[in-house]
Image (cartoon, rainbow, N blue to C red):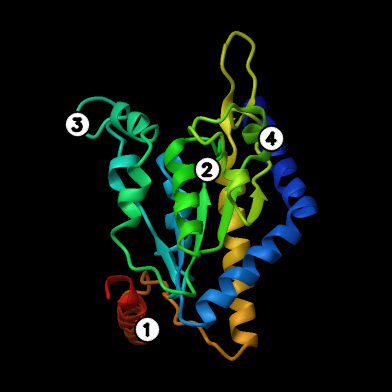
Amino acid sequence: MNGAIAYFEKAAALLENLRRNELENISRAASICTGSIAKGGLVFLFGNGHSRMMCEEMTPRQGCFTGWVALVELALSNHANIVGSNGLRAPLLLEKYEGYAGEILKGFAFGPHDAFIVISTSGIRPVIVEMAMGARSRGLPVIGVVSRQHCEQSAAAHSSGKKLIDVSDVVIDNQCPPGDCVHEIEGLEWRTGPTSTVTGAMIINMLRCEVAERLVALGKKPVMLPSHQFVGHASAAQALEEFYEAYRRSLAHLYA
């Protein structure tokens, strides 16, 4: 169990680094998100590739509430087949195309109280940088979730020379090392044991819980998505329907 224990200890150390170093940035991000949701705005989450998982960790997820929108572009993140149709090659190519993010953003009429969270461990892909730039140009504050160490050490891939850390109003460092993986094995050229899922999910849930508390303190009780695993639970079923309806209403201004 050497590999299992080594990974656990390294991932746990990164979580402790997150707690020690990023509480102020998480608080700043929570202020933005609370302000948006309290005023009837929406907080969008975007990430391509594996980062898409962090968007869905926020919503729809048990314990989430209206105000969050996972902006998941399937062409950039549906690659589980690896080869053939819906494989990995096309998304890896698409994320390098400048102008793609702008076309996604054109599909929405963002409101004055909306905000954006852009998630990328590297923080350099053109689609990521353009998504953040496009949101800011529309007046939305941008929160970047990124490995600062990886991003700072990597060359910019966007023609502007910008990276996610350059175009975010608040940066939350997921504490991951360059390349994400932390476990080295003698005889293997590449490391294994990626950690951005662990630290990224922690960031998302810390942010969710902090925003929920702040909304309640403001008298803005959020409409919750209950656990729908309580089969036959009448109260949970009713709360689920209330969530659907509240979520539908919350999107109205996007298509005005």
The disc, 3 or 4, on the residue closer to the chain's N-terminal end is: 3
In space, the residues marked 3 and 1 are separated at their CA atoms by 38 Å
Look at mark 4 in the image and give the residue it sits on: 149
Quadrant (top left/top right/bottom left/bottom right) for the C terminus:
bottom left
Say which of 93 and 222 sits in front: 93
Given the current orientation, which residue lies at the most extreme right position?
20
Q: Secondary structure at mark 2?
A: loop
Left/right placement of residue 251 relative to residue 9 reads left
In space, the residues marked 1 and 2 are separated at their CA atoms by 33 Å
Residue pictured at 62% horizontal, 44% vertical = 165
Left/right placement of residue 227 relative to residue 167 reads left
In space, the residues marked 4 and 2 are separated at their CA atoms by 12 Å
Residue 5, image x, y percentages = 67, 33
Quadrant (top left/top right/bottom left/bottom right) for the N terminus:
top right
Residue pictured at 44% horizontal, 40% vertical = 50
Residue 3, image x, y percentages = 63, 26
In space, the residues marked 3 and 4 are separated at their CA atoms by 34 Å
As drawn, the label of residue 239 is 1
